Image (spheres, grey):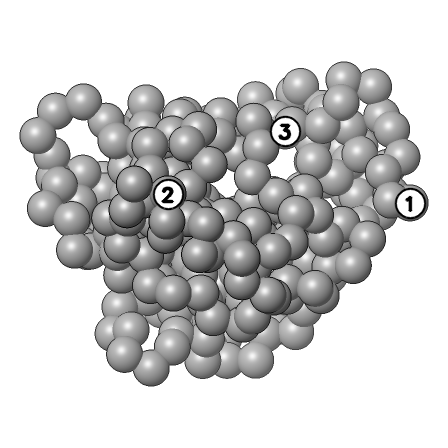
Amino acid sequence: MRFLCSLLLLCSCVTSETLPAFTAATVGAPSSGAPAELSVPEGPGPFPAVVVLHGCDGVGPHYRNWARQLRDWGYVAMLVDSFRPRGVYNVCDQVMEVPPLWQAQDAFAAADYLRGLPNVRADRIGVIGFSHGASAVMRTVLAGAVPQGHATPFAAAVAFYPGCGRPASPLATDTLILIGDADDWTPAPQCVTWRDQVQRAGHSVQLKIYPGALHNFDGGPALPQVYVGHRVGRDAAAASDAIATTQAFFAQHLAP
């Protein structure tokens, strides 16, 4: 009952920049529809962890599948819903209704929650995002984006087809960017410029561009479709390689 009351309170909120801190009352099991869903590997731990940020269409099967995949790789996965607690369900045709910066702040709040769990390695927390959530990831990896009171940046970050703006501060996190060269929603050349302009500050940037791949290449429809004016579609070869690349990247940066 306490969980349901907290969930109703959160869902009644108008759009706002900052969500309440995550608590045991607002973090639920996989597919629970809670403001955050936690997937935990079997065993006593402690485990490394990954915060999962959804795209402009909100939490759905694609992102829950990724949380499950991360769990199967041995990570605690925390899928954060940045939309419904703000009274929003989809921003694909109005992306600034919940700006990526707000999602980035949600990611840091989720990491704070994870660091308080006894079965999580507090020094081994990463973040992964897709499209709108990947644009949020691109903000979390910069030193200037780490909020006051957050002493520790993410240990690793993966961004699937993000919007890459201009880096405003040095890099604070080792970063992997995965994108298609046929993406007409978040063009790959912008990420090339970001990679070349960001101050590394001792951290690494890997950018992998998949020939012919569209936006949402790892989870889109089997045949390309137009969605809010952009072409989206699955590319099986790119998806398979990106999954393997992500697994290797997190193993390198988050495994004990």
Query: How far, Cα to Cα, is label 2 from label 3?
Result: 33 Å
Does residue 40 appear in the picture of this structure? yes
Which is more N-terminal, label 2 or label 1? 2
Q: Is residue 206 left or right of residue 221?
A: left
Q: Which residue is mark 3?
A: 218
Quarter that holds the C terminus: top left
Circle 2 SS class: helix
Given this view, does label 3 or label 1 mark the residue nearer the observer? 1
Q: Which labelled disc corresponds to residue 4?
A: 2
The relative height of residue 252 versus residue 165 in the rendered view (above or below) is above
Three-letter amino acid code of the residue under disc 3: Asp
Tell me which residue sits at (37%, 49%) in the image: 5
Query: Label 1 crowding class (10 Å Cα cut-off): few <14, some 14-19, many 20+?
Result: few
Three-letter amino acid code of the residue under disc 2: Leu
Three-letter amino acid code of the residue under disc 1: Gly
- Cβ atoms under marks 1 and 2 closer than 8 Å: no
Tell me which residue sits at (33%, 82%) in the image: 148
Which is more N-terminal, label 3 or label 2? 2
Query: How far, Cα to Cα, is label 1 from label 2?
Result: 37 Å
Q: Which residue is mark 1?
A: 229
Residue 45 percent coordinates (x, y): 11, 34
Quarter that holds the N terminus: top left
Does residue 126 appear in the picture of this structure? no
Residue 48 percent coordinates (x, y): 23, 42
Between 24 and 117, the one lying in front of the other is: 24
Which is more N-terminal, label 1 or label 3? 3
Residue 12 percent coordinates (x, y): 54, 57
